[in-house]
Amino acid sequence: MKQPKILLLVVIALLPLTLVSCISGSAQLAKGWAGTAVHEGIIYVGTVDGRVVAINSSTGNLEWSYSIAPGTAPSSGLSCGPTSAPAAIYDTPVVDRDIVYIGTYSGQVLALNTSARSARGEDLPLQTRYGEWKWDCPIDNAKSNAIVADLLVSEDAIYVSSSNGRVYSLDKEFGDLNWESKILDEKYGKLWTSPVIQGDTLYVSTFDGHIYALSLETGELLNWSFESEAGFASSPVIYEDTIFLGSFDRYLYAVKIGSDVPLWKFPEEKPAGNWFWASPIVNEGIVYTGCLDGKLYAIEAKTGEKLWEFDAGNSIVSSPVLLDNLLIVTDESGTVYVFDLSAELGDEAVPLKTISIGAAVRSSFCAQEGLVYIRGEDKQLYVVDIEKGEVSQLISLTIEE
Amino acid sequence: MIEVWNLIIGNPVLNVLIALSHLLSGSFGLAIIALTIIVRLISWPLTKRQFKSSKALQDMQPKIQELQKKYGKNKQKLQEEMMKLYKEAGVNPLGCLWPMLIQLPIWIALYQAIMRALATTPENLLDLAQRLYSWDIVNQAIPLSSKFLWLDLGQPDPYFILAIIVGGTMWVQQKMTQAPAVDPRQQSTSRMMLLMMPLMFGFLTLMFPSGLALYWAVSNIIGIITQYFFTGGWGYLKFRSPFQSTQ
């Protein structure tokens, strides 16, 4: 009689394991946090239901949308087999003339003709006659082909970092492959950071702590590379031959191109409270960088000396944005901080304005003509009027609502 | 509730696992093996009690068989007498279950830790930042490589090798401790139990990340080794029939 009891106990014991696996498994889903881009009065953004949408910034009307084919969510745990999931988008769209370029987590790069789509207003399939194209990133040795990092669009090419560890160069007009690099991150296999161009060289940072220099023409590795003990979390930014980027060891690195040792590491003594996840921005010799420990720092680009800091109290996930003399930063809680860079900010900066949008923010955002366009994690698109300090909800970014 | 769980079990297991990974040349697989050894060391007092119970049950077999012969037809009386015998010997027949139940929170925490540490999606990676302690050893280990031998520790083993190892070692371990029943009806239940658990865990191995299955496999192997040395042999693994030994 004891054995059936034991059996029952074992089944009861395994039940929570099964439940937890299913719950945690669903948390593994990639949902995306595409940022906003604004061009000629139209806001472009990727949605969590797998669409690229164009929204009129004045009226909040949907100009057009393009639905991306659903991706497949990985299975995990008992009874949680592979499921169909909306194509996640982490990329901020890039607008160049009439074309919007965007990469997707399902491994596609899309070029969509915005003026032709605005004229039709429908959710059309891809139209080659409008000069639109789609490129599918190869699945390399069963590695994911997901595109997480923002695309880099130059005069005649598009550069794509893929989760399979390679960088691809595509022809901007037709989406043909120009070249593919070797696998740059053998250890982790994925490139989730965007490349950056300086002259005829492409610089790429990796999770295994390297900065590589690639030929813009051929994708071949050039002689110089930089190696750090810790992996790089953020995409590199170049200012006056120096690369600035955040690391998982909770330092911001400044690396002079061609040098084997960092120009400086910030903070100088003990590391910051968390990772420098978002890319810094550099303006007039000053590096502005947010940290996941909730602090915003202004650092002298040449020396690494801290000029001022501000504690937002919540993680700063997205990069700061400049709007004339104003520095705009959001934290994860959805509070927008505005700093007047023309004013004396002291050691502990005080924001000119603090505006709450009332929703969490993880996406990058854009600003134009006194307005900031932010995609909230609540699937709403918000407009913040900096001068008035007002927030308005422009449009819901889900079809259901 | 979830926050309390993360504070007490989830985050400590995650950080220890990542720290171990850094100490073991960045190998997440070796970190899981090291954590398994640590868990087995911590749960040694319980395991020791389990072994003692198992040994006592083994020693009691002749008396149990006697009772079964004597009260074979009176089930209630047999149960009463057997319970009395267990009580006199200070043995809990369900005692062997406790180490497994105690390990359950570790399994759950380990499963979560593996999925969180390997951060397969950008959301997971960002979420990981909020769970890490400020230890340098932890932050220098991030991100982690999921490769170990032929395995991707965040995914089930595609070659079924780990499933066979987990199922096989579990069968051996159970066979070493499970006393063979004399009653023919109990024999069939006993045989089913002996097969069901290894099959179930073999099946779970096909479903869960191989990092968790690695924990099961190593834990079973440690169990077999310690049991072999503690009880001085293979226990019931070599047991043939209770009738053969009494005849």
Image: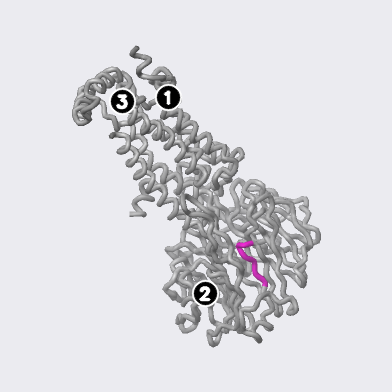
Classify 10 Å Cα crowding around label 3: few (below 14), some (14-19), many (20 and above): many
Q: Residue B226 carries which label?
A: 1
**Residue that numbered label 2 is attached to:** A374
The spot of residue B144 in percent (x, y) is 56, 46
Image quadrant where residue A175 sits: bottom right
Please tell me whether mark 1 sits on a helix, a strand or a loop: helix
Residue type indicated by callout 1: Thr
Q: Write down the quadrant of residue B242 in the picture.
A: top left
Q: In the rendered image, which residue does mark 3 sit on?
A: B53
The chain to which mark 3 is attached is: B
B172 in relation to B160, above or below:
above
Nearer-the-camera pick, A22 or A56: A22
Query: Which chain is mark 2 on?
Result: A
Specify whether residue A386 is in view. Answer: no
The numbered mark 1 sits on a residue in which chain? B
Packing grade of label 1 (10 A; few <14, some 14-19, many >=20) is: some
Q: What stretch is highlighted in magenta?
A: A101-106
Q: Residue at x 43, y 21 (%)?
A: B228
Residue B9 image position (x, y, % from top left): 38, 46
Classify residue A152 as left or right of residue A318. Answer: right
Secondary structure at badge 3 equals helix
Residue A233 picture location, percent across and down: 58, 55
Foreground label between 3 and 1: 3
The N terminus of chain B lies in which quarter of the figure?
bottom left
Q: Nearer the viewer, residue B80 or B177?
A: B80
Q: Mark on residue B212?
A: none
* Residue depicted at x 45% and y 80%: A391
Give the CA separation, mark 2 to mark 1.
59 Å
